Amino acid sequence: MSKKPMPILLIEDDDTVCQHFRERAGNRADLSLIGTTNSSAEGLQMVKRRQPEGVILDLELTKGKGDGMQFLTALQETKLALRPIVTVTTNIQAEVMYDSLHEMGVVFVFSKKQPGYGPDMVFNMLLNLRNSLPVIQTENKDIATVESPEERQARILELIDAELNDVGVSIRLIGRSYLRESIYYLITREKNESAAVIYDVAQDHKINYNSVIRSIQTALNNAWDRADIETLKAKYPVHIDIRTGVPAPTEFIHYYADKISKFL
């Protein structure tokens, strides 16, 4: 039986490495990189809120905040309904360190210096572990697994924000807010109620529908003007009208609503 794409969180302090992982994840249908951070504390909060099935953890985080050991210690002390599979990436090669990591629940350790190391090697290992270690994906029976409506709303909006941030939609533009609300409406409504989400956003704000469309298009134009096109193609692998070179609002909203719905 086919599974939903595996949601994965990356905790890494090197921006170039993060970008490499994002680009490779954007070309795969079997997983989704649902967030990146260079902070061990923020990583723990993202695990709680976004519920990834897999975590890729850089051990040192020398350019970030905290370190991998702090994250693992806090993760052990946190009660979760779904405990993620954790893999570590590191430049440290010491047997005693590997033993300590395994004792703290790390399933696999990658040396960044090993031949062939890269995003696909790590992604493939996580997917293999997902299939071979179902016990790690077993719910903790002592924890309530049903989200409150408020918790579900917060989690969906955070996933939307992560996707909009990833393609560079500026938080300073009002079109960003309209996009966020439209995607949220499309995710949470019944199919027969989803056709008019942009109209509903306009009505909520008591403004004209065309004004909402123009603001959304301005936000998308701004993002596509500022970013590298090849990078955007990897993140947003949808056909774009060659005359404009920018996504249409409705297509953009439907793409991300469909993408995020797969992880809910």
Image: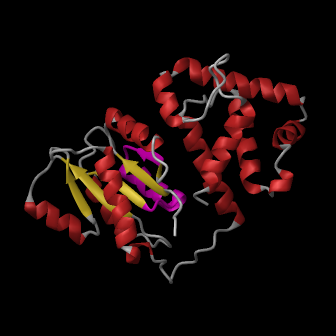
Q: Is residue 40 magenta?
A: yes
Q: Is 141 positioned to the left or the right of 109 in the image?
A: right
Up the image or down, 170 lies above or below 136; here it is above
The spot of residue 180 in percent (x, y) is: 69, 41
| Range drawn in magenta | 33-53
Residue sitting nearer the eye, 187 or 248: 248
Q: Quadrant of the C terminus?
A: bottom right
Q: Is 200 positioned to the left or the right of 236 in the image?
A: right
Q: Is 239 positioned to the left or the right of 48 in the image?
A: right
Q: Residue at x 60, y 56 (%)?
A: 262
The spot of residue 192 in percent (x, y) is: 85, 55
Q: How many marks?
A: 0
Residue sitting nearer the eye, 101 or 172: 101
Q: Residue at x 29, y 37 (%)?
A: 63
The spot of residue 230 in percent (x, y) is: 46, 25
Question: Does the rendering let one see residue 171?
Answer: yes
Up the image or down, 217 lies above or below 253; here it is above
From this viewpoint, which residue is outermost toward the front?
Answer: 1
Residue sitting nearer the eye, 112 or 48: 112
Q: Where is residue 253, by image quadrant?
A: top right
The spot of residue 1 in percent (x, y) is: 52, 70
Q: Residue at x 48, y 54 (%)?
A: 46
Question: Does the rendering let one see residue 71?
Answer: no
Q: Where is residue 247, by image quadrant?
A: top right
Q: Is 9 positioned to the left or the right of 219 in the image?
A: left
